[in-house]
Image (spheres, rainbow, N blue to C red):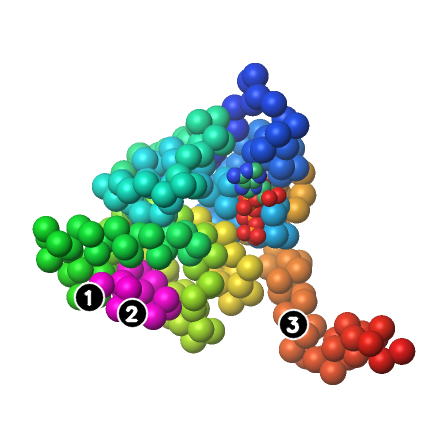
Amino acid sequence: MSLRSVTIIKDKVNDRSYPFSIPSIKGSNSITFTSEVTFFVGENGSGKSTLLEAIAYQCGFNTAGGGRNNMYEIKSSNSTLGEHIRLSWLPKINQGFFLRAESFFHFASYLDQLSVDSPDIFRSYGGKSLHEQSHGEAFFSLFNNRFGQKGIYLLDEPEAALSPARQLALLRIIRQLVKEGNSQFIIATHSPILLGYPESKILNFDTTPVSEIEYEDTDHYQIMKGFLNRRDLYLKELFKEDTE
Ligand SMILES: Nc1ncnc2c1ncn2[C@@H]1O[C@H](COP(=O)(O)OP(=O)(O)OP(=O)(O)O)[C@@H](O)[C@H]1O
């Protein structure tokens, strides 16, 4: 594990506007990483992506998604919070990647542009343009070919494109990179499958300050378990007004 903590520097910031107004950010001064795999969980809008993007910014990765050398511009690639956090490393590492499901299309287009002058570029991405692969296949090409030794991997909802079977396969890839490559993962997710990774820490963005939560205590686990165990009851309750 290399990234030990993130300190949020709040001098002279306006805590009534984004991003310092987000309760999880407003209520936290630092976040500590104690495991090679850390998950960010919390309701939609709780601040997970905002913090992940800020970490990516401080790592020198493209905040639109990519690694250190993947510099391309799209509208969303500035990070106010990124300029107000400090990362503590031991040891410092420079390798890694910020996977952002929502802007992956732009990353794929950027690689296509590079391939005009460097046709070999796709070797690191499964041998062909990411646009010629399905969303999930393209993610997998990235995980299998671009992710490697001793890196820090910041993944924002990687499950967005992955079938349940591929989510399980991603758990294997993560394990391999952690055990053999000494890599570190920070993953914002809503997936009960990914959250099941053993020996991970889960940070809950629905509390102020952000705090650790056990897997079985997350909404993701409880709702999914309840739904799968008692689907009929869940649906009956959910649609109650419709039938009354
Ligand atoms: N560029 C922006 N300007 C202003 N507000 C923003 C901006 N980006 C996000 N927000 C707001 O900040 C809050 C946190 O957003 P963020 O994307 O970090 O949430 P999240 O926890 O990742 O949510 P989700 O699970 O839906 O991806 C939300 O209320 C969102 O509307």
Please state, as top left, top right, bottom left or bottom right, where the C terminus lies in the image. Answer: bottom right
- Location of residue 222 by image quarter: bottom right
Q: Secondary structure at mark 2?
A: loop
Q: What amino acid does circle 1 point to?
A: Lys
Asked if residue 212 can be seen in this view, the reply is no
Judge from the rendering whether residue 84 lies leftward or rightward of residue 183; answer left or right: right
Q: CA distance from mark 3 to mark 2?
A: 33 Å
Return the x and y of residue 147 as percentages of the image width and height.
Answer: 27, 55
Q: How far apart, in angstroms, are the residues tagged by discs 1 and 2?
A: 8 Å
Label 1 residue SS = loop
- Select label 3 or label 1 by which is in front: 1
Residue at numbered disc 1? 128
Question: For residue 120, which quarter of the picture?
Answer: bottom left
Q: Where is mark 2, residue-wise?
A: 133
- The residue under label 3 is 225
The mark nearer the N terminus, 3 or 2, is: 2
Q: Is residue 192 above or below residue 180?
A: below
- The residue positioned 85% from the left and 73% from the top of the image is 241
Q: Amino acid at mark 2?
A: Gln
